[in-house]
Amino acid sequence: MGLFRRGSLSGILQKIFGKKHAKIGIYGPPNVGKTTLANRILRDWTGDIMGSVSEVPHETRRAKWKKDVKVDNGNSSLYMDIVDTPGIATKVDFREFMNTYGLSKEEAKRRAKEATEGVIESIKWLEGIDGVLLVMDSTQDPFTQVNVTILGNLEARGLPVLIAANKIDVEDSSPATLKSAFPQHPVVPISALTGYNSENLYSTMVAHFRKTKRKKRR
Amino acid sequence: MTKKDRGISFNLVSRQKLGALSSDEKLKFILQEVKKGNILVLEYGLTPLEQTSLIENTMKEIEHDTFIGVEMEGYGQDNATFIQKILGMTKKPRLTLIGPANLLKTVHKDRNMIQTKIIPGRGVK
């Protein structure tokens, strides 16, 4: 046996230089702009997009991912597998799709059914990721149960989380409220729609997600 | 007696009751109660991992015409004090409110208060 086992040596190097590759999940409640942000990241770094966006909640009902997206902050870089997950919710009512968004009953029921499956898929993905980009709507109350539950879950697993305070292009947004609500995590105000402050987000992503994974338990 | 005549049941669940159950038993108990139309206040709340499992289980149980999910509001875990950490005491989850989403609506939540409304007849029957 050599002086260093392969695993140990790579572990030591990783601790010194940080991770080179990480699987990052984009999480959050429905309609906070997860896919818009995923599209922004991919467009900026690969020229591609992740998926379609819509004002109707639960547009993304299956997780989508893009492998080996290289994000650079000038000093260092990180290869990321970006996973765009369906929005997590505690309730799904097909009537909302009909009454608020004008979908037919059949279409609304199908969307609701797929949305419930999407939530389950999102939760299952938590098992296999290295870090989370948690997207919150900076025009909304930050203490929603979904935000609190996801954050608590990630903290319990010891996974690094970066909060993207999205929609700062909207007049009544308040990213400062998000920052004061979750002071234990880095919060980056951003407009995924316009790309405002995306450079700061990328820089923080590389620095934050390069850190080695601390612990992971269920 | 009609369903309307029965009113809405509001149950306070002690920490002893839930503490005696495993996580799976706890989640099963909660979902059973909520699906019956009961609103629960858990003295000893669910851990974030249990909350996540509750969301997952809820999604599996959703039926368009009878059960659209849960309204759940609670607080994260209290931070253990230095002494508690030395003694190996774990963080304690705080109070959690759970009810059927067709009945219970959160109006406001901040660090110290959860305000909800109970709306009979809202959403599914």
Image (cartoon, coloured by chain):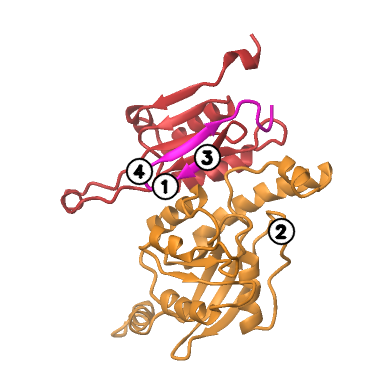
Amino acid type, residue under disc 3 in the picture:
Thr
Placement of A18 over or under A64, stated as above or below: below
| Circle 4/circle 1 CB separation < 8 Å | no
Question: Is disc 1 surrounded by few (<14), some (14 to 19) or many (20+) residues within 10 Å?
Answer: few
Q: Secondary structure at mark 1?
A: loop
Magenta residues span: B107-125
| Circle 4/circle 3 CB separation < 8 Å | no
Q: Is residue A183 magenta?
A: no
Residue A55 disc label: 2
Residue closer to the observer: B27 or A87: A87
Q: Residue under circle 3?
A: B106
Can you tell which chain is drawn red?
Answer: B
Q: Secondary structure at mark 4?
A: loop
Amino acid type, residue under disc 4 in the picture:
Pro
In the rendered view, does B89 fall on the left or right side of B40?
left
* Residue A194 drawn at (x, y percent): 63, 75
In the rendered view, does A185 fall on the left or right side of A51?
left
Q: Residue under circle 4?
A: B93
